[in-house]
Amino acid sequence: MECIQLIDFGSTYTKVIVVDKLAQQIVASAETKTTVETDIMIGYEKAFAQVKGQVGGECEWTDCLVCSSAAGGLKMIASGLVPELTSEAARLVCLGSGAKMLEVFSQKLSSQDIANIKKLNPDIILLAGGTDGGNQDCIIHNAKRLSETIKQIPYVAAGNKNAMDDLEAIFNENDVYYKITDNVMPVMNQVQIEPAREVIRNIFMEKITEAKGLGKAKEKLSREIIPTPMAVLRAVELLAKGTEHSKGWGPLMVIDIGGATTDVHSACDGYPTHSGTIMKGLFEPFLKRTVEGDLGMRVSAESLKDSVGVRTLEELSHESFSYVTDRCSVLSNNTELLATNKREVDFDESLASAAVKVAVTRHAGLLESVYTPLGMLFYQTGKDLSSVNTIIGTGGVLAYSKNPEKILKHSLMDKTKPEQLMPKKARFVVDGAYMMSAAGLLSERYPELAFKLMSDYLKKVGKKNEPQKQKMVRRSVS
Amino acid sequence: MNAVLVVGVIGADCHSVGNKILDYAFSEAGFKVVNIGVLSSQEDFINAAIETNADAIIVSSLYGHGEMDCRGLKAKCIESGLENILLYVGGNLVVGKQDWETVEQRFLEMGFDRVYPPGTHPDTAMKDLIFDLRLNMIPEGGSMNGVYSAY
């Protein structure tokens, strides 16, 4: 048996999945507490012992792939020029690289901004500003001010290419670590993600993993470690586009409801589907990721309540005002708490429904109508998700839910608000086995295998879908 | 370095033919054109000009509400650090038959450097650009007969 080991060092759990390369199936999986404070390998060794037990004796470990969001994941700061243009493009690049966005700055940075950045202590600072041939003052000013004060943090410069020679001189003079790459917005309204993402991935591997206590993992397991959200994005892309031998699933969306954040990934062009619609603003990328830091099941339960309003949660859960407020405060103060009875489970599902609704609304584009002498026309900003035909849910609340469809259906268009360009009709799929990040790890070297595993293990839910043969994943939790 | 022009149609106006013609004519003549297209707000013009470090903003308006749409553009430019950018406007700027001199005067008072009536040839604006920007260029593409230079 040839086995591939897929490891995900999460913020709370370390998950290990073992895939049989020839039989193309998962043969073992285990999760243990992440031990990043002491030695990350302790938790891993424990999980490895478990999977080894499940696999049995004859097994040849041919490959080992690792992703991590331990020790806070990859935290980034971005700065651009105009908030709606290069700053927004820089934000999309950071999120598309699997980073957690601490703050996005615009225009020339002030001393307060720089003090603020120092305090936030990001892992990488991304500098953008100006189209190629456009404004240079802003990015030069920012690079100068930042590198004079903050020396320890790696810089990625992805702005106006005409300013890059000056930036190189500034960075060299101040003796900081930097990488220069292609502009995030080379021409007006066009976002270019890949070159900067590649550079960020390299810096994460070279510099950040060591600092996050993953040095041993890098040494013993795999030279390449990528941020977990980047692995998920790779899986999303593979599933949507397909491989050489398998047809992709087409436009799709992944919603990941976590304790602290709700992530939404979409893989679709998002072009207008209404006639008489004109695109405005940035053209968003095919593969888009957004992270809502205020929407979550535990740490962010309180901020979720504030964002959606107590009233909405009352309606969703049929609970009283006082129960909603009390429970949210209890959940956000006790992040390890699990729902034990039906009432608590139902309330968790109401929170998840609200998180899904708000997160997808923010991810989706917006249609505005304008009356002109030529009749009514529409402006579209962002992506039109109505072509999305598959919605995949991940996260504990969905994996353990008896009725995940009820939660996921809040991602569909609200008929009273057709201006929010959310999916119209879609089949729902649940990732109960944490397949997405594992498949994303496999996707570079073994795309066919990754695609096959996702097709097999992602579970379709809802009445309209025909029953599908399901493969079970053996898992042990300690 | 070629002069950079931000070109677009302002307000709820979606006349795109003239916009395409201007884009073509200016590009052929050797200008770097940043075309933000129809239905553009004042902020769209300003944001594009900041990011591209533009030398001039050229506003088109065909549907008669130009005066309403253009008010305050100069003030916003100054506020955004674009106090020296050239502002041109042209098209069917007002409704009905109004005296051109007074229309032009109104737009000049709003802060525009050049105001063009309906039916203006792109060459006219190019000639003015070369003069106003102190450019020493011979437009390519042969749409202009002869050489215009500020010097």
Image (cartoon, coloured by chain):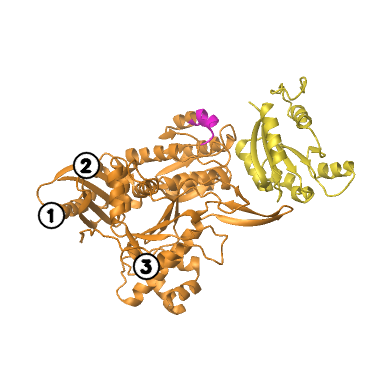
Chain colours: A orange, B yellow
Q: Amino acid at mark 3?
A: Lys
| B105 sits left or right of B90 in the view | right
Q: Nearer the viewer, residue A397 or B92?
A: B92
Residues in magenta, as a range: A159-167
Q: Give the CA separation, mark 1 to mark 3.
A: 38 Å
User: What residue is disc 1 on?
Assistant: A53
Chain hosting mark 1 = A
* Mark closer to the chain start, 3 or 2: 2
Q: Nearer the viewer, residue A369 or A201?
A: A369
* Mark closer to the chain start, 1 or 3: 1
Residue lying furthest front: A466
Residue B102 lies within the magenta run? no
User: What residue is disc 2 on?
Assistant: A63
Q: Amino acid at mark 1?
A: Gly
User: What residue is disc 3 on?
Assistant: A463
The answer to whether the residue labelled 1 contacts the one labelled 3, judged by CB atoms less than 8 Å apart, is no
